[in-house]
Image (spheres, helix red, strand yellow):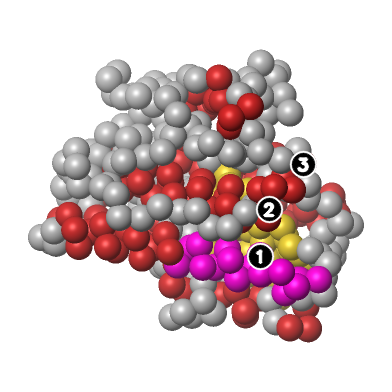
Amino acid sequence: MGGSTSSAQVSSRASSAGSSAAISTGSSVGGGSSVAAGSSSTTSSSGGVDPGLCARVGMPAGAIVASHCRGTNHQDITGVQRVVFVGDSITVGTPPTPSASYYRTVLSDQLAARFALQAPSATWKASNPLNGMPGERDSGDFCASAKWGARTDDLMEDNTQLEDCLPLDQRNKTTLVVMTMGGNDIFAIAEARAAGQTEQQVQALLDAMVLKQDQALAWLKEPGRFPNGIFVIFTNNYEFTDRTGDVENCPGAAQAGYNATWGDTAGLPDAVAWANARYIQMAVARGVDMVFMEEAFCGHGFSATQPQNVCHNPSGPNYFDLTCFHPNASGHADLASAFLAVVTE
């Protein structure tokens, strides 16, 4: 590892993989469990590492931060025979970004080369606007069941994204699962709060969201379900306001239905921070890896130029398209790079 981490914040892959679930629920939104930005667990002297990103990465005890700070390093990902993409519209990809720029397209080609897999077709790499899903589900050694608008309950309850791509006759293959999930839950919860739901009601919705995500990870890591091994990488959740809560800075905010500035205690950034603190707990408890998507996208949203912003970045490229919520080509490129970094370290 090239990153500097204290002994209290480092656990072995073996012990991490065998631990039980340890997500906490019920505490108030905004109460994270991360260390202060800039502490020893978030800095690295490795060449090419973004010091601003390392400073924004906060970790609970037990997590291993990869030297590049793009994600955790809980798994030695080797011998992959099949790759599965599940999740929401970030994973499917959305217009106007061309399908050749989707992170799923870029990453699948990189993984095919790295693990000598049969690459997916151009149809698989495209998005189908009629059903909000990839152009085809199965192609080569790849499967994708992600869908526009999907929420955490679509992994196993309202829909069956996991089982659709992981049928019994495919579970003998060493599998890598790649996932983005939770953003649609958070925005629905934020809308519920704006519509008048109480903080207690909002907290119950957030608790249900993280529980469903953890249940999906538990299903994937159930001993014996994948006899030749399974690796999982998922992202935490971003938002486009660079932690300001000022949704109206996005030019398309009104058309997208975002027309309010969230407050300090019930705001969008706080909901994202609360959920993300639980997501990293899941990664540690389940022995899987998490990409720090929020930390990487902060400073590349629509409020990045505000001087008082903790993610102030007056010259960096914007990572979001005019829907406000979806990544543009630059955002997809960064996300593909982050996933590959986690795979390769």
268 falls in the magenta region: no
Residue for point 77% across, 41% down:
344
Q: Residues within 10 Å of mark 2 (few under 14, many from 20)?
A: some
SS under mark 2: helix
Marked residue nearer the N-terminal end (3 or 1): 1
The amino acid type, in three-letter code, at marker 2 is Ala
Image check: 40 left or right of 130?
right
Q: Residues within 10 Å of mark 3 (few under 14, many from 20)?
A: few
Residue to which mark 3 is pinned: 344
Name the spot of residue 75 as percent of width and height, x first: 73, 48
| Residue 10 appears in the rendering | yes
The answer to whether residue 244 is above or below residue 211 is above
- Residue 323 in the image: state x and y as whole percent: 35, 53
Please give left or right for residue 344 compared with residue 130 in the image: right
Residue position marked by numbered label 2 in the rendering = 17
Asked if marks 1 and 2 touch (Cβ < 8 Å), the reply is yes
Distance from the alpha carbon under mark 1 to that under mark 2: 9 Å
Is 320 or 285 nearer to us in this picture? 285
Q: Are marks 3 and 1 in contact (CB under 8 Å)?
A: no
| 75 relative to 79, above or below | above
Q: Residue most toward the right?
A: 116
Q: Which residue is denoted by mark 1 in the rendering? A: 221
Amino acid type, callout 1: Lys
At mark 1, the secondary structure is loop
Q: In the drawing, what numbered circle is on residue 180?
A: none
The numbered mark, 3 or 2, whose residue comes first in the sequence reads 2
Question: Label 2 near label 3: C-beta < 8 Å?
Answer: no
Asked if residue 105 shows in the view, the reply is no
Q: Nearer the viewer, mark 3 or mark 1?
A: 1
Q: Given the image, on which type of amino acid does mark 3 rest?
A: Thr
Q: Which residues, given as a range, are shown in magenta?
A: 212-227
Q: Quadrant of the N terminus?
A: top right
